[in-house]
Image (spheres, grey):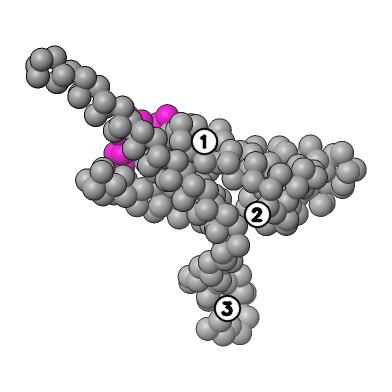
Amino acid sequence: MIKASVPKIKVIKKQVEGIRLSFGSLLLMLCCTFLLVLSTFVQLDITHFIIPKGLFSGAELKFSDFVYTYKLIPQVPVAMFVGAFLGRKYGIASILLYILIGLFIIPVFALGGGPKYIFEYGFGYILAYIPAVFFAGSILKSGFTNRNMLHAVLVGVLTVHFIGILYMLFIAGLKHEGASFMWGWICAQSGIKIIYDFILSFALVFLAKYAKIILWFFM
């Protein structure tokens, strides 16, 4: 009779562990969604040295001419972190939750929220997080090697900016914006920003690799 009850105990134990895992996954998804919201309103000042244009023209230069500060909103890198940390399945769920909250519950996007936000020029970048996380998660599924991480970040970041630009062009076309406006938008949102997004995304994906190890160690 004792032996007969052992399989039942194992079944119950598996069910409890499954519930715990589901609750843990939900909690992690909510935390990552909160990170996405937080990253929308965070601005990082990235300062580094540059070669000024006037260096070879004989112009009188000051020290400040050799220093450049770029103000980066790190949402793309955070989206890449979410995909790497949660994986493809839960990463996409976290992104969808963020989008639904912004469209129907709380204005968590950079310029507000609500259903009308789909007509904002930058909404395409947000939508692009879904395929970006899918592609990056698919690549990282085979392991967090340096090559895979570089590949995932490259594909993910380029996907965000490519779809973001196409969406902007579509909305700008609907609003009959001129070519100068479109070009200016592309330069501002997907010019040098791609480089910063790539560097910071790789750093956060690298961090996600060890965050996953620590997470499983304590589970």
Residue 59: in sight, yes or no? yes
Report if residue 198 is visible in the image: no
Q: Are there few (<14), some (14-19), or many (20+) residues within 10 Å of tag 3?
A: some
Pointer 3 with pointer 2, Cβ within 8 A: no
Mark 3 and mark 2: Cα distance apart in space? 36 Å
Query: Which of pointers 3 and 2 indicates the residue nearer the eye?
Result: 2
**In front of the other: 216 or 170:** 216
Mark 3 or mark 1, which has the lower sequence index?
3
Dot placed on the residue nearer the N-terminal end, 3 or 2 = 3
Residue occupying the far right of the picture: 176
In the picture of the structure, the residue carrying the numbered disc 2 is 108
Disc 2 crowd, CA 10 A, few/some/many (<14, 14-19, 20+): many
Q: Three-letter amino acid code at disc 1?
A: Ile
Q: Which mark is residue 65?
A: 3
53 in relation to 154, above or below: below
Disc 1 designates what residue?
A: 92
> The residue under label 2 is which amino acid type?
Val
Quarter of the image for residue 127 reads top right
Q: Magenta segment, which residues?
A: 138-146
**Mark closer to the chain start, 1 or 2:** 1
Quarter of the image for residue 166 reads top right
Task: Determine the secondary structure under disc 2.
Answer: loop
> Which residue is rendered at x = 34% and y = 37% of the image?
20
Residue type indicated by callout 3: Asp
Nearest to the eye among marks 3 and 1: give it. Answer: 1
**Residue 208: x, y in percent?**
36, 48
Q: Residue at x 63, y 50 (%)?
A: 190
